[in-house]
Image: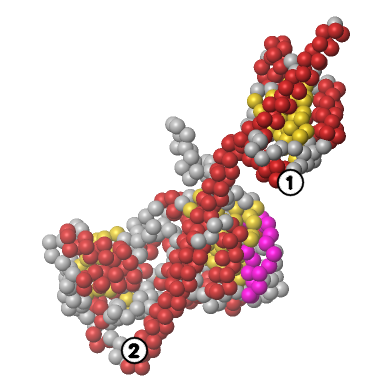
Amino acid sequence: MSRHKIAVVIEEIGQSYQSAIISGISSGAEKYGLIISAFTSFSGDMDNPRHDMGEFNIFNLPDFSDFDGAILLTNTLSHKVVVNDILERIRIAGIPAVSIDNDLPEFYHIGIDNKNAMRVITEHMITEHNYRRFAYISGPRANPESEDRLEAFCQVIDEHGLRIEKNAIHFGDFRAPSGKAAVEQFIDELPEMPEAIICANDVMAASAITALISHGYRVPDDIAVTGFDNTYNSNNYQMELTSVERPLELSGELACKMLYNHFKGISQERDIILNMSPRFTESCGCIHNALSDVSELRELNYRNFSNFESLQNYTSVLNRMSTQLLACNNFDEYIASLKRIAVEIHPDEFYFCLCENWDSESAVDNTTKGSNSRTSVPIAYTDYVIVPIIYINGEFHESCRIRSQDIFPPNAENDSDGRLYFINPLHFGERCLGYMAIRSTRLPLQNIMFETFCINVSNSLENIRKLMCLEYAVKRLGSLYTMDTFSGIYNRNGFVQASEELFRKSIEEHLNIMLMFIDLDGLKGINDTYGHSTGDQAICSIADVLVDSCQDGEVFCRFGGDEFIVFGADYSDEKARQLTDRIQENIAKINNNGLNSFTLSASTGYVVDTPEEGEDIFSFVTEADKIMYSAKRRKKRLLISEE
């Protein structure tokens, strides 16, 4: 059976709102046989634009034309430019999409009546409790849901002839720190604290309650607090929170159903508005509605304890993972360690995918003078990625190389069951390293601990990259110390290092050595006639001749200027004569090819002897040099006599 592939775009899956919807999407994937790839990022509370850039890059990974549909939670994304780019790419791909809560006219929509829900909450606080002095903790200004809830609150306040102090509205981001920051603002800037604080979601409301209590305020006796979404009580129990109960999991499941109906050609409405119900309880002053059933309280406490115990176990794994990965000294150790961790957390599937340039040595801030460009830093996914870890149902598979747009290796699970994958970025700052794809029915991925998992993996991978770059740099420095960068062969330092052990062994075992001295003939004439660049070419040609001629373990180098030396261990006079002949033959080949404007010529001289304890290799160089110059003088006399 052909399975439909669905892309989900969502940020901060560890938040209660996103987690509940993802749970519904997971159920819908299984129920309707959909393969869900949830492209997720964690960027909201880092206060680091470069980190955010690396996180948001995950949304550039999917080629939406490779998917059959999409589910969008654009209200969770904090950057409008990123949202607009995603929407445009989906429009170009021409695939159906369901937008949850943010009503986008060209797509299917699942939402609630935010305005009516907030009206009910605010009316209750005024008419039932007679509160008159209010403050409000809002979500982001550009968020449609946030704007609707604030607008409804202000309308009700206005209709009842009440007024809001100038600094009694705090714009947050739906995250816990916003609740605390809002309370601090109200304490510092309001002439009198409010009787009630209305919050745009439960997370900020719970944080606000904690902050109020820390300042000595009693909730609800001194200040009442309300939330929205009813996600807090399912995870925490400080006090029951007045809120709006909405079917978040149902939203996720219905999104899958709408796409399934679209694929099957089943008629349906474009827009679904779900019912919701207010829960008036302890935090607003409705104490009579508070939880009183002992068995229900025990069940809630047990569930919270189980969650706490699970988090403790997960934290222990993360701590071990962090120390193990950071202790790795090379890439092979790193992959082996990460494989052990994969076994320990036992996901159903785990794919570790690295950009082909992940180990690039480019500096993160590699700007040139007068330029703000950082184009040398890898900030985008490469066309192909390597997959060093493929873990499926408890078994590792051979690594491979795939197109990045394919997301998964070809041996990924391929049965007919629906399933949900999380696709998370690997990056350091804006540097793109790759991505992870993970599917699990046991590991709690919709949890802030999963964010810690992703950060630990990325940071430790960057640590390995830097260690590799340091190793590259050390090798280059070593090369500069030992290699003649002009000719590409050893310099004197390299020659000494490469021949030292062979020379010592020759002394200990009384073996003959050979030391040959080679000098380029007529370099001054070449320079004077053709220029120094041609003279340089002649020097490099001799180096090439030695590379081609020395095929029996000889060590050779550019000794200086146009002089070269060759060392051979366990050598005979016959081998030395043969090497001399090969050198002259290779020089003749260069001359015969007719590519040079000059005639290449070199004089050689060698000595074969058994070194004794206390002798230095360069004493043999001096002797070979004398023999070479005797040969050079004979060659000059012969040329003069021929003229």
Q: Determine which of the numbered discs, if any, sits on residue 509 in the image.
A: 1
Question: Whole-percent x and y of residue 4?
Answer: 64, 68
Whether residue 251 appears in magenta in the rendering, the answer is no
The kind of residue tagged 2 is Leu
Q: Which residue is at the front of the view, 433 or 481?
A: 481
Q: Is residue 466 left or right of residue 610?
A: left
Q: Decide: marks 1, 2 in contact (CB < 8 A)?
A: no
**Residue depicted at 33% across the width and 72% down the height:** 202
Residue 307: percent from left, percent from top? 42, 80
- Which of discs 1 and 2 lies nearer the camera? The answer is 1
Is 219 on the left or on the right of 445, as rendered?
left
Q: Which residues are magenta?
A: 389-404
User: What residue is disc 2 on?
Assistant: 297
Using the rendered image of the protein, determine whether residue 430 is visible from the camera's viewpoint: yes
- Other residues around mark 1 within 10 Å, as few (<14) / some (14–19) / many (≥20): few
Q: Quadrant of residue 168?
A: bottom left
